[in-house]
Amino acid sequence: MWIRKDKFHENFCQDLDADGARVMAVTQKAPLATTFGDMMSDPAWRNKDCWYQISSEDRMIHPDNQAMMSGRMGAKKVITLNAGHASLASMPAEVATLIDEAARAVAI
């Protein structure tokens, strides 16, 4: 499963500049085929606190699906960023802040 390089920027990381998108497009890796058929017996979110970030402009996973997943997980906190699928690259400070908050909340 690959995203065509000529469609990558438009669909995966539309909020990055062209150079950043090009680097991501040429270095993308397809997931293992087994990923889509693997069964998980006890996902960590059932027993551990979790935090969730929704990308409101995501063209890979619809934001409504992200909201459903975060609700199913019972996320302690959900933030929505005005970002495409590659929010880690386009809004790193905001994502890092959420990760830091989560880490501090569960630190022993």
Image (spheres, helix red, strand yellow):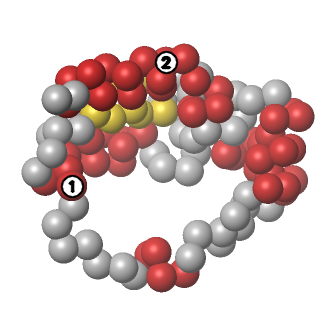
Question: Can I make out residue 7 in this image?
Answer: no
Q: Position of residue 79 (x, y in %)?
A: 35, 23
Q: Nearer the viewer, residue 51 or 17?
A: 51
Regarding mark 1 in the picture, which secondary structure is present there?
Answer: helix
Above or below, comparing residue 90 to residue 73 in the picture:
above
Q: In the image, which disc is placed on residue 94? A: 2
The residue under the point 36% across, 43% down is 66
Q: Amino acid at mark 2?
A: Glu
Query: What residue is pinned by disc 1?
Result: 44
The residue under the point 16% across, 29% down is 108
Above or below, comparing residue 74 to residue 92 in the picture:
below
Apparent side of residue 55 relative to residue 45 in the rendered image (left or right): right
In this view, the mark in front (2 or 1):
1
Distance, label 2 to label 1, CA atoms, is 24 Å
Apparent side of residue 43 relative to residue 8 in the rendered image (left or right): left
Residue contact at pointers 2 and 1, CB within 8 angstroms: no
Q: Amino acid at mark 1?
A: Ala
